[in-house]
Image (tube, rainbow, N blue to C red):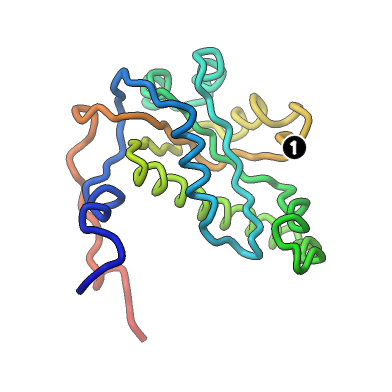
Amino acid sequence: MAYPVSDEAFDTIFRKARSYNGWQEKDVPETLVRATYDLHKWGPTSANCSPARYLFLRSAEAKGRLIPHLSAQNQEKSRKSPWVVIIANDMKFEDKIPQLFPHNPGAKNWFGDPQAHFNTAFRNGTLQSAYFLIAARALGLDTGPMSGFDNAGVDNEFFIGQGGERENWRSNWICNLGYGDKASVFERLPRLDFDEACEIL
């Protein structure tokens, strides 16, 4: 069967891609980080609501503010990562709906129920951030996704009380970006086969 992309692309994005715990001392230019965002943003979300937000930490000072809120096993690898990305959801994402869904600007009022509002932000923000990880890999970067951190601590440090739109961001997960050190990866872990994870009705 012929596929729209090459077998090599499948390897780069999925089959041979790994989560890295260590990084080469090799610079990642800002242009590549911007290209990752610009590629990933085309992925679909509900009503094009696009709630994911990204705070990129590059300086030692910025990463130093984050380190105390990470679990012990995540601190050193994040300190040495060329870029650390706090991936957040905008809890006022609906304010952008008239811009993002211009044929029906009233759609911003679809999210009045608090639980539906939270679910929309979390579901679509997480979906977007998965696109981000895939885009980074497709552009030749390695990733180190992490969930071992204090959400409230990160939010208080970087979002709450900061003013501007970032005031409404809330952390979802964190990703290190760079060129990975192959010695830092663990042995490849198994995955579930189709018949273990799927059913057809």
Determine whether 109 is above or below 143 in the image.
below
Determine whether 127 is above or below 27 in the image.
below
Determine whether 20 is above or below 113 in the image.
above
Q: Residue 19's image quarter?
A: top left
- Left or right: residue 16 versus residue 60 is left
Identify the residue shown where x is 77% and y is 66%. 107
- Left or right: residue 54 versus residue 156 is left
Q: Where is residue 67? Give x, y as percent.
A: 49, 20
- Front in this rendered view, residue 99 or 64: 99
- Residue that badge 1 annotates: 165
Quadrant housing the N terminus: bottom left
Identify the residue shown where x is 33% and y is 78%. 199
Q: Where is residue 124? Give x, y as percent.
A: 57, 56
Extreme residue toward the bottom, this view: 201
- Front in this rendered view, residue 107 or 120: 107
Identify the residue shown where x is 26% and y is 55%. 10
Q: How many marks?
A: 1
Q: Where is residue 91? Give x, y as percent.
A: 70, 47
Q: Residues within 10 Å of mark 1 (few under 14, many from 20)?
A: few
Considering the numbered disc 1 on the image, is that residue within a helix, a strand or a loop?
helix
Q: Residue 3's image quarter?
A: bottom left
- Left or right: residue 130 versus residue 105 is left
Q: Where is residue 12? Give x, y as percent.
A: 26, 47
Q: Amino acid at mark 1?
A: Glu
Identify the residue shown where x is 48% and y is 48%. 39
Q: Residue 162's image quarter?
A: top right
Quadrant housing the C terminus: bottom left
- Front in this rendered view, residue 52 or 37: 37
